[in-house]
Amino acid sequence: MKIYEVKTYDEMSRKAANIIAAQMVLKPNSVLGLATGSTPVGTYQNLIEANKKGDIDFSEITTINLDEYQGLDGDHDQSYRYFMNDNLFNHVNIRKECTYVPDGTIGDADEACKAHEEIIRTSGGIDLQLLGIGGNGHIAFNEPCDHFPAKTHVVTLTEETREANSRFFASIDDVPTHAYTMGIGSIMSAKKILLLANGAAKAQALYDTVYGPITPQVPASVLQLHPDVTIIADEAAMALIRKNR
Ligand code: PGA
């Protein structure tokens, strides 16, 4: 694992965007694995600016997202499809038909998950997968559990997650109960992985990811087994790693 410590969220976002931009320049038809959440927003802003300046071109890029709420369509402002359109796709010269987010409108979980795996397979595989990390070490919607789920699958959202996300919905009853998420195997099959972490709330999870035992109780710890992982983290997220080095 290569670990870069940066001072601020902005610096993390610029560095991450530079790595993604380099990937796009070296391989203009790259398949990028993308993530939602607050962590990558700044990275997407930097990519939008680079695209506007003419430094990077999305016209041959394919994107594949990690996860989506079951039951939300892309017009719902809390769907991850909406998030991606709003934070990146609507502002760059990407072909929307080459952007894939698991389809939350497919009610049959098996069908939805198989379709997403098929997209990963037929794209030729993800060249660079961008990841955030949860305070409990989750990646995508792979929460701590007793095994590493291999493929895209349906998860039942914990009450804790639904409650945390309810601030974005009219009421907790409107928060979906299930989500589709790429599995650990789908994520690990990416050729390169770029994990971003900022803020003190991520410090323990980041430490466990890098130095802890490889365990599904800390899903991100599996990244120790991946041959090409880059981590960019700010000072607060790096606090425990720095202390224990
Ligand atoms: P965040 O979420 O970017 O909103 O902190 C990251 C995650 O839970 O994967």
Image: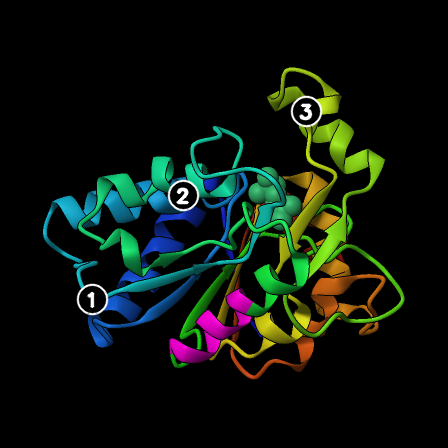
Residue placed at 75% from the left, 33% from the top?
162
Q: Residues within 10 Å of mark 3 (few under 14, many from 20)?
A: few
Q: If the image is split into quadrants, where does the N terminus sit? A: bottom right
Q: Is residue 6 above or below residue 187?
A: above
The answer to whether residue 119 is magenta is yes
Dot 2: element: helix
The dot on residue 60 is: 1
Q: Which residue is drawn at 68% across and 24% down?
A: 174
Q: Position of residue 195 (x, y in %)?
A: 54, 60
The quadrant holding residue 29 is bottom left
69 with respect to 79 (left or right)? right
Task: Quadrant for the C terminus, please.
Answer: bottom right
Q: Is residue 7 above or below residue 140?
A: above
Judging depth in this view, the residue of 187 and 96 nearest the camera is 96
In whole angstroms, how far apart are the C-alphas of marks 2 and 3? 21 Å
Q: Name the residue under label 3.
A: 174
- Start and end of the magenta stretch? 115-123
Q: Residue 84 carries which label?
A: 2
Q: Mark 1 or mark 3: which comes first in sequence?
A: 1
Residue type pointed to by label 1: Glu
Q: Residue at x 51, y 79 (%)?
A: 228
Is residue 98 rendered to the left or right of residue 182? left
Element assignment for label 1: loop
Q: Does the residue labelled 1 lie within 8 Å of ligand 1?
A: no
- Numbered badge on residue 85: none
Eye-nearest disc, 2 or 3:
3
